Amino acid sequence: MRENSKFEIRNSKQARRKGIRNPKRAPARDERLVLRVSDLFRISGFDIRACLVAAAGLGILLAGCAVRPERLPVCPGKPTAAAALQTLAARARDAVPLRANGQGRLTYHVPDKERPERHNLPMQMWFNPPADVYIQGSVGVDVRAVIIGSNEEEFWLALRPQEMSSYYTGRWQDVRDFEGLMMSPRVVLEAFGIVAAPDGEPNAALWSLQNKGPYDILTRRDEAGRPVKRVYVYACDYLVHKIEYYDPAGKIVAVAALGDYKPVEGFLVPTEIGVVATGSDGRKDTMKIELSSLKLMKFNEQQLQRLFVPPDTDKFEHTYRYEEGRWVPQ
């Protein structure tokens, strides 16, 4: 996974991909409306809508987003952060292309309403390691109401239910911390265990390691010493059980919990994952997704072009681009 704004993975697939399309500047909108739409995808002050559920693309076992409550055997952890990252990088190299179906359950808060909204949505997910993700979620009869995707260079989130038409896009190289999308390609990739890039972790000095009980706890900080994320890895099998994401003030704003790993050609995939995001008002939005029917996938050229290239921006009423740590209307 890309760290410190540079995702170092490059391969021959990029040569066949188109570059980022220039976003079409949307007509001026009421500022309150624009901010409200933007807030749907912020980790801080996250006012999520039902149509976002499919974007996480994985399943969750939520126990308050805490590490598994059962008492786990304790194994010796890694001696250094560098050794831990090398093990995670080796796991990332073992990743296999796959597809899966899933069912999402979303609980979220709407501004000016006390009670949360709850929705169940079906979804489909495709993963082509190391960085290609495509997830589509159904809202009503629209099977592509929500699309989230990424490749080695870009990531995007496209929403087109009746009440919203919005498109979010950015380049990995512009992401310094967490890009702020709860249903993020970053969360998906790290849920698969790709916390360190398959070709090695370029910024191992920014990580520290703590051994606590059955877990190796890896903490990544930025150049200023602020915590960016904390990864809980079970030392006995070195699978990721929990990831905490922090805002610039050092506050936990999102937690992903992973469980029930299933093998696909020897590569273990979490089929239960959950995300909890805490808004600026202290209210929590939660997402649970259970994956099923995991299958090995062999992508052809047409599928690569269709799934892992961002959609045209002119199909959406609102367009936002990630620039200098924030989402900017275009």
Image (cartoon, rainbow, N blue to C red):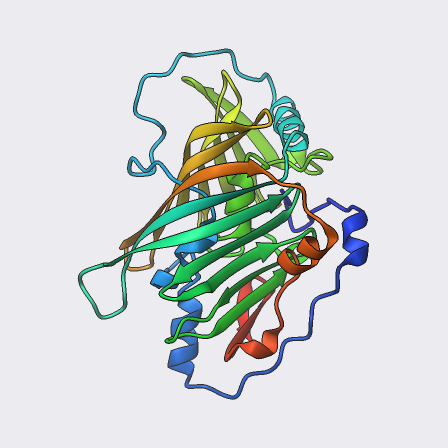
Task: Tell me where residue 186 appears, x and y as whole percent.
Answer: 55, 48
The residue located at (60%, 24%) in the rendering is 84
Question: How many labels, in total?
Answer: 0
Q: Nearer the viewer, residue 314 or 291?
A: 291
* Residue 227 appears in view: no
Q: Give the quarter of the figure containing the C terminus.
A: bottom right
Q: Give the quarter of the figure containing the N terminus.
A: top right
Vertical side of 252 occupied by 138: above or below? below
The residue located at (60%, 27%) in the rendering is 265
Task: Tell me where residue 26 appears, x and y as whole percent.
Answer: 55, 83
Q: In the visual, does 57 lie left or right of 223?
A: left
* Residue 326 appears in view: yes
The residue located at (53%, 57%) in the rendering is 148
Res 179 quadrant in image: bottom right
Q: Nearer the viewer, residue 217 or 206?
A: 217
Q: Nearer the viewer, residue 174 or 19?
A: 19
- The residue most toward the bottom is 28
Task: Tell me where residue 188 appears, x and y as whole percent.
Answer: 52, 45
Task: Tell me where residue 202 appears, x and y as whole percent.
Answer: 71, 38
Res 52 quadrant in image: bottom left
Q: In the visual, does 317 lie left or right of 172?
A: left
The residue located at (41%, 86%) in the rendering is 30
